[in-house]
Image (spheres, rainbow, N blue to C red):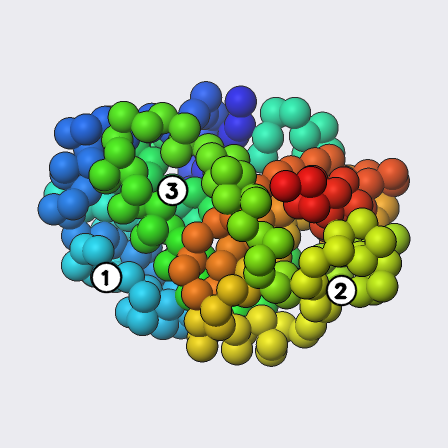
Amino acid sequence: MKKTSILLLLALLSAAVIAQERPYPTVADAEMFKKSVICVVMEDDPFSFYNAEIKDAVSKYWKVTPVKYITVQEFNVMRNDPAYSFLVLTITNFSNDKSGSTYDFLNLLLGADVDNLDELPEFCAIPLCFSGAPEEEYSYKLGLIIRFMEYHAELVMKNPSLSALRYLKYYNKNVPDIKNKTILVREEDLAPEINTEERIAVHYPYRVRIVDEEEIMRAIEEKHENVVIVHKVGPDGVKRSGTCMKTLIGTDDAIMYYYDSHMADSKNASGLLISDLKRLARF
């Protein structure tokens, strides 16, 4: 079980909405989504860094449906109408995460005539950052995240009966392809024991480069071929506890090649672990 609340509606909600799982889209939902207008819910803050970044990413990369930008107040009115789909920030915490940590997710939802926000059919949900982290932590990857969400939504529309698409672990079927690609990763997204390329090579004999944000941004914008980037969401620092989620996404095709999570604590860092490298190398 997880608890979620609409991040942009925190001022309007007295408590987090409790959710078992958002409904997986039905065949009818998939048909409605194809005809919908996607509404990107913007923050009320006129100086919002997120507003500028999400608008830039969506305008560049979202092609599958028409786009509209709306306010929180408009979302409250429009969310019951299946003629609209929504790209909206949420805060999530997990019942098995005893640290009390929360995480910012980007959710792709279809409007529905339901009372509870967590009853809206969910086409995709991607973790963006540990709640409270600066937006700069993920903003340079936002274009690639939008491309992946569109790719995933199209898969759901084509295969609404394939319930495995509900979970990002569905994409672990692509792990064998990673060894033919170059992994780009920031040093801060690696466990300390594998924070150099030499240490990585002991456990993973294929191509990995430790780079800065600028190089990752360039690979995303230029859609470098046969490159995957590490997108890590978790608590900052090795001593803080909480869920750490790790994904590898291709910069050329926007396909996810790996997803896993673990509890970060005094024994397991918030980042890619040796166990991740060994798993990638097995195939």
The residue lying toward the viewer, choosing from 205 and 224, is 205
The quadrant where residue 45 appears: bottom left
Evaluate if marks 3 and 2 touch, with contact meaning CB atoms under 8 Å apart. no
Q: Classify mark 1: helix, strand or loop.
A: loop
- The amino acid type of the residue labelled 1 equals Lys
Q: Earlier in the sequence, mark 3 or mark 2?
A: 3
- The amino acid type of the residue labelled 2 equals Glu
Q: Is residue 101 above or below residue 89?
A: above
The answer to whether residue 264 is left or right of residue 71 is right
- The amino acid type of the residue labelled 3 equals Cys
Residue drawn at point x = 19 percent, y = 55 percent:
65
For the residues labelled 2 and 1, the Cα–Cα distance comes to: 33 Å
Q: Earlier in the sequence, mark 3 or mark 1?
A: 1
> Where is residue 124 drawn, in percent x and y?
38, 42
Q: Which residue is mark 3?
A: 124
Q: Which residue is mark 2?
A: 187
